[in-house]
Image (spheres, rainbow, N blue to C red):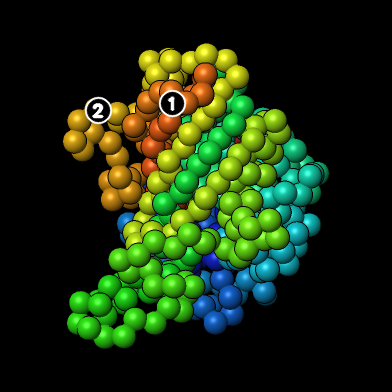
Amino acid sequence: MGYRVAVIGATGNVGREMLQTLAERNFPASEVIALASERSAGREVSFGEDKVLKIQDLAKFDFKGVDIALSSPGAKVSAQHSPRAAAAGCVVIDNTSYFRMEHDIPLVVPEVNPEAIAKYKKRGIIANPNCSTIQMVVALKPLHDLAKIKRVVVSTYQSTSGAGKDAMDELFNQTRAIYVNDPVEPHKFPKQIAFNVIPQIDIFMQDGATKEEWKMVVETKKIMDPDIEVNATCVRVPVFIGHAESINVEFENPITVEQARKALSKAPGVIVVDKREPGGYVTPAECAGEDATYVSRIRKDPTVPNGLSMWVVADNLRKGAALNAVQIAEVLIKDYLKK
């Protein structure tokens, strides 16, 4: 017997990727339901290579009898409909930022803290972390187990797809405009994104950090260890898909480059590509459409007693969102919702 699965926000970048990932991984679904706003109702979306689903109106949908919902409609919509789905007996895996820091809602990356999924029973909701946090903690977890992480300094290079389809369109349209000498007008971003980088993702907070940077700090502490100190600088770059991160880690205990490489090579969800030669590393263009978190440029930081630096790349729509949510659902049906 299969599971009835709803995908909320099925017309968005992440929603479409969720549908694709469910199909690719042969998730045991007896029915997949595509949900979005009233204005999208009746439209069709692809499910796998040969199936098409008709969008249903989220506001009118009754979640009774639905086992799992993968939700990515935006925080405000999720705040309204995720609790409604949970009240109907559906377990919601929510990709928005709304529930992540609620103390009684687990924040989960299956390669890092799958045991936290058990806490879903309290409110019927499991939170999917921020995309930039997910790929970082996947790479950090095996190293933390080996030498205990004390401090992390991370600079991100985040693609436009993290801000949605309109943001990707803005990069495309601005690039074309520059080539034909048309005016370039920012709409989705605070400044021109084509041929530029923007050191702001989300709003500014009182201490000068952006909310994206704050998310990386507090989510890493909740997922991995509250004693890990994190300093993040999050930057939007003119890339369509794939986030990259330059990560500097200070450990409490000694660790060598060889030990780190060995631990990362054995870690679930991680692929090490670290050849000390031109092109011997992974870039966002190569990770698009891939499930793994790629680690390159592993090297000693000589400025602190126990320090390493590395380069981490992942597809933000897959491991950074859709794949992570589906992996949570897979653990859920394996260990908690067996039929």
Residue 278 in view in this figure: yes
Q: Residue at x 57, y 15 (%)?
A: 253
Q: What is the secondary structure assignment of the residue under circle 1?
A: loop
Which image quarter is the C terminus in? top right
Cα gap from disc 2 to disc 1, whole angstroms: 18 Å
Q: Is residue 142 left or right of residue 52?
A: right
Q: What is the secondary structure assignment of the residue under circle 2?
A: loop
Disc sitting over residue 275 in the figure: 2
39 or 294: nearer the viewer: 294
Q: Where is residue 120 drawn, in percent x and y?
A: 73, 42
Q: Where is residue 220 drawn, in percent x and y?
A: 62, 39
Circle nearer the viewer, 2 or 1: 1
Q: Residue furthest front?
A: 303
Kind of residue indicated by mark 1: Asp
Crowding at dot 2, Cα within 10 Å, few <14 / some 14-19 / many 20+, comes out as: few
Q: Reading the chain from its start, which is encountered first: label 2 or label 1? A: 2
Kind of residue indicated by mark 2: Lys
Above/below status of 332 relative to 235: above
Q: Residue at x 25, y 27 (%)?
A: 275
264 or 310: nearer the viewer: 310
Q: Residue furthest bottom?
A: 182
Residue 337 in view in this figure: no
Q: Residue at x 76, y 49 (%)?
A: 102
Judging by the rendered image, the residue that carries numbered circle 1 is 301
Q: Residue at x 70, y 42 (%)?
A: 106
Q: Is residue 322 left or right of residue 226?
A: left
323 or 135: nearer the viewer: 135
Q: Where is residue 110 drawn, in percent x and y?
A: 56, 35
Q: Is residue 16 left or right of residue 327?
A: left
